[in-house]
Image (cartoon, rainbow, N blue to C red):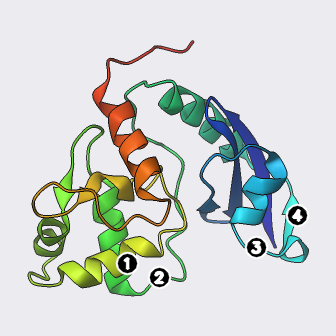
Amino acid sequence: MKQYSIIATGWGYAAAVWSADGLWALSFPRASAEEALASLKVSVADVAEGYPAWADSLGRELKRYFAGEHLDFTVPVDWGGYTPFQAAVLRHTAAIPYGVVEGYGQVAKAIGHPGAARAVGGALHINRTPVVVPCHRVVGADGSLVGFGGGLDRKKALLDLETKPPVIVP
């Protein structure tokens, strides 16, 4: 059975769902813990409240991230449930450095599927772990903000956060 934890961030509450292999799903921050969990569209019957060892680490990292600190997330991600193509897209996206953007076509080429930019968009659309797998860092070929499940306002806010000087949180 998967477990979930609620994490308070500077932008609201995020819900994290954990499997035995790592982070299974992560919500964008919401106004309340209930909204965060509901946004994941997981049945509470399928998850139990719990705090795996990774929850504290993710909580600290999310607080630092949303405070504007440059960091690389260290929690393991559970890649189960994705096709090999989707997993390749998401693993590549997870490696895009903080403050850097790539085009959908660049991602397709980097994973050995040039010309599959639309398919890259489809894979990013089902990303269960936004922010940790930073799909907001993938943009249109001309640099435009397109195709973000969290909404283009949120995509812009995340990219703006990453281009400002960091605020160090102890």
Q: Identify which amino acid the numbered label 2 is placed on.
A: Tyr
Label 3: which residue?
A: 42
Disc 3 residue crowd, few under 14, some 14–19, many 20+, Cα 10 Å: few
Q: In this image, 18 relative to 76: left or right?
A: right
Residue 20 x %, y % = 69, 66
In front of the other: 91 or 38? 38
Residue topped by disc 4: 48
Q: Which mark is residue 143?
A: none
**x and y percentages locating residue 97 in the rendered image:** 26, 43
Image marks 2 and 1: residues in contact by CB distance under 8 Å: yes
Q: Nearer the viewer, mark 4 or mark 3?
A: 3
Classify mark 4: helix, strand or loop. strand
Q: Disc 2 marks which residue?
A: 82
Q: CA distance from mark 3 to mark 2?
A: 17 Å
Residue located 41% across and 41% down the image? 158
Residues at circles 2 and 4 in contact by the CB criterion of under 8 Å = no
Q: Amino acid at mark 4?
A: Ala
Instruction: Read off the residue under disc 1.
Output: 123
Residue 44, given in percent of the width and then of the height, sits at: 87, 70
Q: Earlier in the sequence, mark 4 or mark 3?
A: 3
62 lies above or below 121: above
**Quadrant of the drawing holding the N terminus:** bottom right
Q: How far is mark 2 from mark 1, CA to CA?
A: 9 Å
Q: Position of residue 135 (x, y in %)?
A: 37, 59
